[in-house]
Every structure is written in structure tokens, then in C-alpha cells.
Image: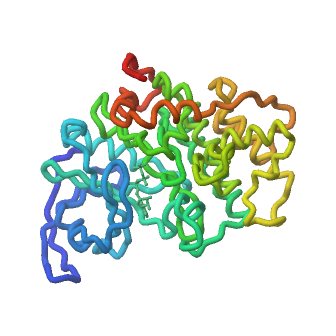
């Protein structure tokens, strides 16, 4: 796709700015027709000037705004607040985004386009009506959504499918790196959509967006990734296992409000497994309204995914088959999970240093260089 093949158009807009110039990427024949390079003014109008009332979230990359495009579609506009030196150049940025928009799966958020205006960069996604799993599952009553067992099962299967697609069908495969409840968005039917996949591709080498200074995020990190920076698909499998345990238990991976001994969800699940009391992990709000056999199977898959030794964790497609009972988890041995407790104690006071340890060179499986200052 040629980035310089933009053209200007005039649209009438339902605001005080009646007519503005809009640059759009003209698709070449055979190219992806769904990809749009938006103009800054178009996004500005769509989000009411990036107003506070349109702001729907804030992440490590920057603020997210709800927007209404002139064609009537509702979008989420992510304003990237990353230093320019960490970001790829204009052409590379657009080319990486084009690649990402070609990834289509029911369980991935659709990236509809981007905007480059000087130093400013924006990503434009389909808007997800039910916000993130973090807010719905762990945000309490204010969301007005109570996730029943069936919905929880559909969500974790959907996330597993989305990840299996990124890991095993996309070529070259994509390691998400940041699987967590706030990166799972829910559409109007509570279908889960994995977001923020492939974002490291828009960064220059050695730049990282993973917000490891956030305790919750830290709890999702596989031990080998946290300690030595080794990034593989099994790193995502670990994070998926943590997410699964959160979905079943309704608890966050780390919660210091709970009683001593219950702070770390993975530790708690492991203790209950060894005591043969796995059902005690299930979210009490579900009462008795869940099939016990499925619950035990799901939790065992979660524990298998968070095993300390990466090679003992299943591939995502295998985990999926275990969840759906196509593969019998009963015969699989589960050993010691990777526990974050020690890591949390050591690292949380060292925000800046810690973050700098999580730099990765590419989206591919990698082992970054020295971590000698890690203490
Ligand atoms: N496509 C979308 N539709 C609806 N809401 C969205 C969409 N994308 C993001 N959001 C909202 O914006 C919030 C911030 O999203 P973002 O992906 O920037 O950060 P995060 O995942 O919460 O945190 P981090 O950047 O540390 O991973 C989300 O939690 C969600 O509430």
C-alpha cells in the first residue's frame, strides 16, 4: 500500500464545523478495503475535540475516546502518548497497522484504521459496548452486569480461540505479551474481543509498552518473562491461565484486601488443588448455579497454563481442547505453578528499574539482553 496515495474529500458533518478536509488512504486494487487512514480533524470532530466526556479509558499507551464517525459507526480512538523516539516512523507505522487490520477473528477487536499527523499517532478500533472484562467481572455492582456461569465459560473459550489464532494461525505468529482482564473487551453480546495485540510492532526496537509498574499487570507475567525477559507463546499461555482463574473466581490476581494467605490467586488455586478443594475457588456470587465438573476442569486447565516450567504449559489450541473436554485433563499431571509472590515483594518498590527490564526487541519469541541491574 502506498502511503502517499492519499486524497482529500469534503464531507458535511453534524457539528459547528460544517465542512472539513478528510484524507483517506486510497486502497489499491486487491488491498484491504476496510483500512482507513483518518485525518486528525476527522477524529477531532468524531470525539468532540477529544473531550473529557468522550474519554472512556486510559492505558499505558495513552487515552481512549469514544467517537462517532460520519458514516455513523461508533469507534474507540486510542491517542498514543508515547515519545516519538520510541515509535516507528510514519510509513512503517502505517504499514504495521495495515498488517494488523488484516487479522480477522471473532475474538479479536477490529482495528479499523489509524491517523498520523506530525508527531501525533492514533489507532481507531470498533467500539465495544460492554467495556472491558476487568470492569464487568471485577468492577463490582456499578456495571449492572452479573456474569453467570455460561457467560464466563463463553468468555474464556473465546479468549482461548483468539489467542490460539494469534499463536498458531497468523504467520508469523504474534505473541500478545499483555493478556489481562482490561485487554479483553466485551461487545453487546458479551462476546470477548482480545485488544492491544501486535502493538509492540508500532514501537521501535527496544521500546516496550507493558505497564509492569501496575501490580495487577505484574501478576499476569510468566516467571521466566519477569525474571529473564524470555518471551514466547508460553508467556501468553501463563497470562491466559491467570485470566481464567480470575474469570472463575471473580478475584483479581493480586488482592491485598483479602485475608493473609489469599492475596495471590495462583497460590490460592494451587493450595486448593493440593487440598482437593478446588470448588472453593469458584466465585461465591454464582451460588450453586454452575456445573461442578466443568468448574474443576476449567480450574485445572488454568493451573496447567500457569505452571512454572514453560514447556509443561499447553499450547493454546491444546488448552482450548482441554477446556471443551476434547482432551481429557484428568490424565495430565499438574505440577508447581509459577508464583509471583516473591517477585512482587522484590520488585514493586523499584518501578522505574523494573519497567526498564521488560524491553523486547520484536514481537517474535526473544530473549532480551542483560538484566544485571535487576535487584
Ligand atoms: N475498542 C474499545 N471499545 C470500548 N472501550 C475501549 C476500547 N478500547 C479501550 N477501551 C477502554 O479504554 C480502557 C483503556 O484501554 P487501553 O487498552 O488503552 O488500556 P488498558 O488495557 O486498560 O491498560 P494497559 O494499557 O496498561 O494495558 C479499557 O480498559 C477500556 O475501558
Q: Please report the residue visible at 46 percent of the width from the left and 25 percent of the height from the top.
A: 229
Q: Please report the residue visible at 67 percent of the width from the left and 36 percent of the height from the top.
A: 305
Q: Is residue 187 left or right of residue 274?
A: left
**Ligand 1 rendered quadrant:** bottom left
Residue 26 seen in this snapshot:
no
Q: Please report the residue visible at 73 percent of the width from the left and 66 percent of the height from the top.
A: 285
- The number of callouts visible is 0
Query: Residue 270, image x and y in percent?
Result: 74, 38
Query: Residue 280, image x and y in percent?
Result: 80, 52
Q: Please report the residue visible at 19 percent of the width from the left and 79 percent of the height from the top.
A: 12
- The image shows residue 62, relative to residue 21, as above or below, that is above
Farthest-out residue, front: 260
**The C terminus appears in which quarter of the rendering?**
top left
Q: Is residue 340 left or right of residue 123?
A: right
- The image shows residue 153, relative to residue 232, as above or below, that is below
Query: Residue 188, image x and y in percent?
Result: 54, 71
Q: Is residue 323 left or right of residue 32?
A: right
Query: Residue 136, image x and y in percent?
Result: 56, 65
Residue 178 seen in this snapshot:
yes
Amino acid at each position: 500500500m502506498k502511503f502517499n496515495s492519499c486524497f482529500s474529500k469534503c464531507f458535511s458533518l453534524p457539528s459547528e464545523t460544517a465542512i472539513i478536509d478528510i484524507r483517506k488512504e486510497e486502497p489499491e486494487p486487491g488491498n484491504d478495503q476496510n483500512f482507513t487512514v483518518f485525518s486528525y480533524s476527522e477524529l477531532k470532530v468524531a470525539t468532540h475535540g477529544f473531550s473529557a466526556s468522550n474519554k472512556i479509558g486510559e492505558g499505558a499507551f495513552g487515552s481512549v475516546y469514544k467517537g462517532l464517525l460520519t458514516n455513523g459507526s461508533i469507534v474507540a480512538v486510542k491517542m498514543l502518548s508515547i515519545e516519538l523516539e520510541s515509535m516507528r516512523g510514519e510509513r512503517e507505522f502505517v504499514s504495521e497497522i495495515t498488517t494488523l487490520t488484516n487479522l480477522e477473528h471473532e475474538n479479536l477487536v477490529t482495528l479499523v484504521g489509524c491517523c498520523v499527523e506530525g508527531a501525533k499517532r492514533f489507532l481507531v478500533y470498533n467500539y465495544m459496548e460492554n467495556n472491558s472484562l476487568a470492569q464487568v467481572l471485577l468492577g463490582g455492582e456499578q456495571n449492572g452486569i452479573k456474569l453467570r456461569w455460561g457467560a464466563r465459560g463463553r468468555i474464556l473459550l473465546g479468549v482461548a480461540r483468539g489467542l490460539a489464532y494469534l499463536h498458531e494461525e497468523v504467520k508469523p505468529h504474534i505473541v500478545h505479551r499483555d493478556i489481562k482482564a482490561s485487554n479483553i473487551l466485551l461487545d453487546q453480546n458479551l462476546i470477548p474481543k482480545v485488544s492491544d495485540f501486535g502493538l509492540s510492532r508500532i514501537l521501535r526496537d527496544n521500546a516496550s509498552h507493558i505497564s509492569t509498574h501496575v501490580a495487577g499487570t505484574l501478576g499476569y507475567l510468566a516467571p521466566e518473562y519477569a525474571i529473564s525477559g524470555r518471551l514466547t507463546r508460553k508467556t501468553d499461555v501463563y497470562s491466559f491461565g491467570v485470566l481464567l482463574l480470575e474469570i472463575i473466581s471473580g478475584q483479581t490476581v493480586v488482592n491485598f484486601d483479602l485475608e493473609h494467605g489469599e492475596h495471590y490467586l495462583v497460590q490460592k488455586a494451587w493450595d486448593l488443588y493440593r487440598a482437593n478443594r478446588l470448588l472453593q475457588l469458584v466465585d461465591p456470587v454464582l451460588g450453586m448455579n454452575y456445573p461442578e465438573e466443568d468448574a474443576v476442569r476449567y480450574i485445572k486447565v488454568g493451573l496447567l497454563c500457569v505452571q512454572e516450567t514453560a514447556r509443561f504449559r499447553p499450547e493454546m489450541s491444546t488448552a482450548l481442547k482441554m477446556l471443551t473436554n476434547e482432551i481429557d485433563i484428568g490424565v495430565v499431571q499438574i505440577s508447581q505453578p509459577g508464583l509471583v509472590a516473591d517477585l512482587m515483594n522484590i520488585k514493586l518498590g523499584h518501578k522505574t528499574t523494573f519497567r526498564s527490564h521488560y524491553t523486547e526487541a520484536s514481537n517474535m519469541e526473544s530473549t532480551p539482553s542483560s538484566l544485571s541491574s535487576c535487584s
